[in-house]
Image: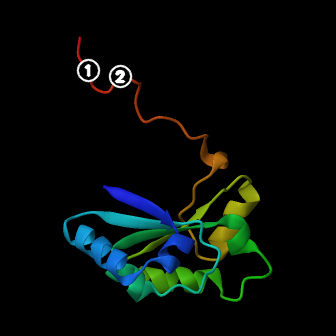
Amino acid sequence: MVFEFPQADLLSMDERTRNRLSALGESGYSFGLDHVDDLRLDAAFLKSLYVRFVKVDADILLGEQVDLHPGDVRRALKRQGIDLIASKIEEESQVLELLDLDISLAQGYLFGKPRLNREDGGGESG
């Protein structure tokens, strides 16, 4: 099972909460970081909290005000076993720009609108 939480929540967590996250990670849970607006990420720290992916809006990755190269961020995360996912992809041109930055994982309306994985019914029979 994977839980996601915003970057701001991670930055405001106290040590006790971080220790509990690590304990959940040791039990087999993993985490994703989303709503990332600061690319200065401590990949080793994220790994210690069992973060397996980081989602960043394409506008941030492709923006002019990025002080770090997004490809460098992706490689630093990858060295710790963490995937960088570009989110809110709405135009094919964004995909091409991201590929030029060595970012190959993405999600957004360009690929399809969000939907349920299965029909509502909750596995009830009969």
Return the x and y of residue 88 as percentages of the image width and height: 66, 56
At 45% across and 77% down in the image, what residue appears? 13
Label 1 to label 2, Cα distance in Å? Answer: 6 Å
Q: Which mark is residue 13?
A: none
Q: Quick one: 111 or 13, which is closer to the camera?
A: 13
User: What type is the residue that disc 2 sits on?
Assistant: Gly
For disc 2, the marked residue is 121
Q: Residues within 10 Å of mark 1 (few under 14, many from 20)?
A: few
At 30% across and 55% down in the image, what residue appears? 1
Classify 56 as above or below 67: above
Q: How many marks?
A: 2
- The quadrant in which residue 60 appears is bottom right
For disc 1, the marked residue is 124
Q: Are marks 1 and 2 in contact (CB under 8 Å)?
A: yes
Return the x and y of residue 35 as percentages of the image width and height: 59, 66
Indicate left or right for 60 with 118 as reference: right
- The quadrant in which residue 32 appears is bottom left
Quick one: which residue is furthest to the left in this view?
Answer: 27
At 60% across and 42% down in the image, what residue appears? 112
